[in-house]
Image (spheres, rainbow, N blue to C red):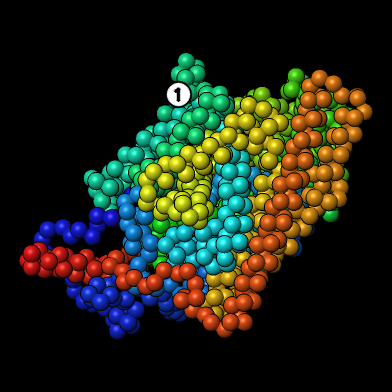
Amino acid sequence: MTEATAQVPAPGKLEFKDDYTPAEAARVIRNSKGLPVGVRPKMVWTWQKALLWAAVAIVCACGWAILAVSRGEQISAIWFLVVALSSYAIAYRFYAYYIQIKIMRTDDANATPAERVHDGANFERTDRRVLFGQHFAGISGAGPLVGPILAAQMGYLPSTLWIILGVIFAGAVQDMLVLWISAKRRGRSLGQMASDEMGKFGGMILSVFLVVMTAIAMAFLALVAIKAMAASPWAVFSIGMTIPIALIMGCYQRFLRPGRVIETTLLGFVLLVLDIVAGGWIASIPAVAEVFTLTAQQLVIALVIYSFAAAALPHWLLVTPRDYLSTLMKIGTLVLLVVGIIIANPSVKVPGLTELASGSTGPTFSGNLFPFLFITIACGALSGFHGAVSSGLTPKAVEKENQIRMIGYGSMLVESFTAIIALIAAITISQGVYFSTNMSAAQISAASGVSVTATSTPSEQAEAAVKAVDSMTVSDIEGNQMKVTWDSVDENGDAKTYEGAEALEKAASDIGEKTIVSRTGGATTFAMGMANFLKSYLGGHDSMAFWYHFAIMFEALFILTTVDNGTRVARYQIGEMLGNVRKLRKFADPTWKPGNIITTMIATALWGGLLWMGVSDANGGINAMVPIFGISNQLLAAACFVLVTVCVAKLGYKKYLWIPVLPLVWDIAVTFTADFQKIFGPLSYFTVASKYQAQIASGELSGEALTNAQAALNNAYLDGVLSVFFLVMMGIFVIVGVVCVARTFAAGKFGAETTSEEPFVESQWFAPSGLIATSLEKKVQREYSAKLHELAQSEQAAA
């Protein structure tokens, strides 16, 4: 999926007519050979553009006003789409551009790591459209799908504010700036850059944190995907077939039709559609479906083997085309969902703030709105793991520096929009159904007074869930006590609203499940909402079960594309960490194939071991560490901002330090507060451990209950110790960063020579900056091709 061979000119004569205007000619960047290698970014204004952006700003302001002031009345979910898209457009066009010209100061005359090294495996110039897809696939895991759904218990307003404003000023800024500093440093990972810029002590802290965090993140994401795939032969087949399809696309783009991205896209799209249809067909035939119904352990083995191959094989062969293919499906599905929301025009059933926003006893997650809502939403607004993908992986493939804004900032905006879609799915079903689905069996039993176990019938579960919901003091958007309702059709096909236990049973029947009670984690809620949107114009009510199971497969695919990228990221991190040892320096060279294989084996063994223990023991492995994933992920984001702040300070951009410092201060306030509360106080893991210790010491437990209590005790202590470990490490890292910035200002020496940036190397390559080339970029592309052709002919004649 690259344009590596596009520099070889085709036979014949290529002509270029110089029709640049003086203003256009001044923006064209040329190298010493006269080749045009870039276009200087510039915001060109016309009165039409001014009117357009004024209209966008007015619509955006109106949308925000409606969401903020509406009380006691239902509002259309379409306003969430309007607010999100208009806010993203303004942020990308103005704020991201401001950061690009004031801090990044991108220069397409400078060769990127992909052009400098270009080894055909790890460093490979990748078409910007394909790389956008790969990067988006690498960063978009479970977070944007389930985090906003869990956070919806507190109302739509705080979640909407954080998802949109958080990504604009924090999440997308982090991804873009980390990608920028890594591209300036030969595509090095976070840990190595920290060593180079902040000293070996700071680098060691971040490297160890990264390896541990990445192993936990990969195992957690894989576990979520396996839970979805274990009961779905459709998902197993469809996701498995994306591998050979990706290989076909990679070879087609590499050998058969180099540079033909649109052709390859169409090929992949057709094969993907056939794959999805075939998956549904296979799932409908019991004998065939049984072949693709794998156990959790079998899926772990398959996933580890695939991830090892994806990380070890050349980038262009499997990872890039498969991630691009996944992105086609992800973005295509998002478009279908947007159309479904517009057509269905669902009303919001949840108020801006619920009673749970002022307490800390919500059933989907415990803790106050500040800080735990921001931790719960996670990747939809800000994620430290994205920094790991933006360093070491994507910068090794980016063609030109001016593409960094589109890839880094733009792809994070798409992920945030995914979170908005997930939020809409949660707030447009009745709150009674929402809480019945997302409360655990233990919570339902405690609230209803009726014991709910795995052996309870669906009717018993539904009755208990309704009692639990009725016992909660939570109001709907009109100020009434929430109820369990479900909009469906009766046996005659007429619209009908079901209530109580009947509503839960009808909802389960509509989506082809036996029960929806206590399907925690958010995935089921998202799939129900997705099915509701799509059936509005694709198949009608009878298609709900189809779309529900399609959504389950979509979620698994959404998550798995992060796992293969994460494995490659972990491999780079481990290699660079080992390379800091004198006798193991060769491991730091990403072009050394034996080192790649060894570090890939270590990476897959780390998260694969945690995952295997997790699927084999409900109380062990990654299951024990899931509670600390959210906070540790956000702590890593703080580390990313610290590193970026140090790099910006060393360049002497004092006036613009607020850009990384503002989200850094907010993230530290949120994550350190959350981690502190998880170490001390009523929400502390150690407090939970004391309760289990008391239960075990009382002698009242026996058998399975005793075993589970002992496992819970050990897990609580493990999570508590890791929380202390992470907090101390990040606290020290922040202090090291502050000291580094202070020393930089005290020394008074600034500029690229004070950093680990690679020296300037003249570029010989041209590529447009955005997803769609501008008219000027098209002119430059034609001139570039013609002049490259002339140079090749001259060299052939001289030879």
* Residue found at x 61% / y 43%: 216
* Residue found at x 58% / y 70%: 646
* Residue 90 sits above or below residue 82 on the image: below
Residue 523 placement: quadrant: top right
Residue 308 location (% of width, % of height):
45, 38
Badge 1 amino acid = Ile
Q: Nearer the viewer, residue 102 or 571?
A: 571
Residue 621 placement: quadrant: top right
User: Which residue is at the far front?
Assistant: 583
Question: 423 left or right of 133?
Answer: right
User: Which residue is at the far right?
Assistant: 698
* Residue found at x 52% / y 69%: 96
* Residue found at x 58% / y 43%: 215
Q: Nearer the viewer, residue 5 or 276?
A: 5
Task: Name the image quarter holding the C terminus.
Answer: bottom left
Could you tell me if residue 56 is visible in this image?
no
Residue 388 location (% of width, % of height):
53, 54
Residue 47 location (% of width, % of height):
45, 79
Task: Give SS at disc 1.
Answer: helix
Q: Nearer the viewer, residue 6 or 780?
A: 6
Could you tell me if residue 69 is visible in this image?
yes
Residue 170 location (% of width, % of height):
61, 63
Residue 719 placement: quadrant: top right
Across the whole image, how many numbered discs are drawn on residues?
A: 1
Question: 215 left or right of 697?
Answer: left
Question: 92 left or right of 349?
Answer: left
Q: Nearer the viewer, residue 203 or 570?
A: 203
Q: Which residue matches tag 1?
A: 282
User: Which residue is at the far top?
Assistant: 287
Label 1 crowd (10 A; few <14 / some 14-19 / many >=20): many
